[in-house]
Image (spheres, grey):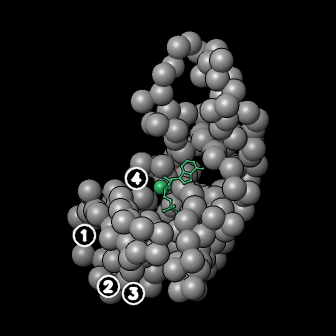
Amino acid sequence: MLDIQSTQTYQERIRRTLISEEEIAAAVQNAGKEISLLYDGTPILLVSILKGAFVFMADLMRAVDVPCEVAFMCAKSYYSGTFSTGTVKITMDLEQDISGYHVVIVEDIIDTGRTLYDVYNLLKGRNPRSLRVVTLLDKPSRRDARVAQSGFKPDMSLFTIDDLFVVGYGLDCAEYYRNLPYIAEYSPSQEG
Ligand code: IMP
Ligand code: MG
């Protein structure tokens, strides 16, 4: 838990706006149009990975005009070493059998890519009719070697960012800042 002494300290830790509300809204509308064109009236299942992706999911689903169901899952990956194989722990699973669905995984950010790589393979094993990944943010410079070697990549990425820690629009630091309407660079060094 953050030691939030005051609202001022809380605000001071936000170094700068990286992506504005307007930029996010425009990119989400474009992504919604792209998805609608891609599936061309075919029903889809949007699967959001909690908690970070719930804000993006809420906006993206309203920018899509194909018949659409939504579902949520919660996943955590644990690693015992840099080159170890990841084991994903599903702390909340999907309710439905996805074998009849065209599934789109909706993620907030791909950093090392380990979590999503594991979730992707897990869902792939459940034989969906198709499986794609849409991420709001991608930090390709941080990708884990094993994930990179596998050729795993998101099908759609709204913003590629540098190796920065970001908060807002669903993304947190110790559970805070998810409610910022924009994406900001977080700076713990600014604390006073
Ligand atoms: P991974 O390293 O790609 O497995 O990322 C796992 C999770 O770490 C993401 O889904 C986010 O919840 C979190 N994460 C990674 N980078 C950031 C960041 O810059 N800000 C907030 N959360 C992050
Ligand atoms: Mg996440």
**In the rendered image, which residue does mark 1 sit on?**
96
Identify which residue, 1 or 90, lies in the foreground. Answer: 1
**46 sits to left or right of 74:** right
Q: Across the whole image, how many numbered discs are drawn on residues? A: 4
Amino acid beneath label 4: Leu
* Residue 161 rendering spot, x and y as whole percentages: 72, 57
Amino acid beneath label 2: Gly
- Labels 3 & 2 near each other (Cβ < 8 A): no
**In the rendered image, which residue does mark 3 sit on?**
129
Q: Is mark 3 on a helix, strand or loop?
A: loop
Q: Is mark 4 on a helix, strand or loop?
A: strand
Q: Label 3 vs label 4: CA separation?
A: 23 Å
**In the rendered image, which residue does mark 4 sit on?**
50
Q: For the residue carrying disc 2, how many other residues have a C-alpha within 10 Å: few (<14), some (14-19), or many (20+)?
A: few
Identify which residue, 15 or 64, lies in the foreground. Answer: 15
**In the rendered image, which residue does mark 2 sit on?**
125
3 or 1: tag closer to the N-terminus: 1
- The answer to whether 23 is drawn above or below residue 33 in the figure is above
Quarter of the rendering occupied by the N terminus? top left
**36 sits to left or right of 176:** right
Q: Is mark 1 on a helix, strand or loop?
A: loop
- The answer to which image quadrant residue 180 occupies is top right
Amino acid beneath label 1: Gln
* Residue 73 rendering spot, x and y as whole percentages: 33, 59
Is the residue marked 4 within 8 Å of ligand 2, measured from its CB? yes
| Residue name at image x 39 percent, y 87 percent | 129
- Labels 1 & 2 near each other (Cβ < 8 A): no
3 or 4: tag closer to the N-terminus: 4
4 or 1: tag closer to the N-terminus: 4
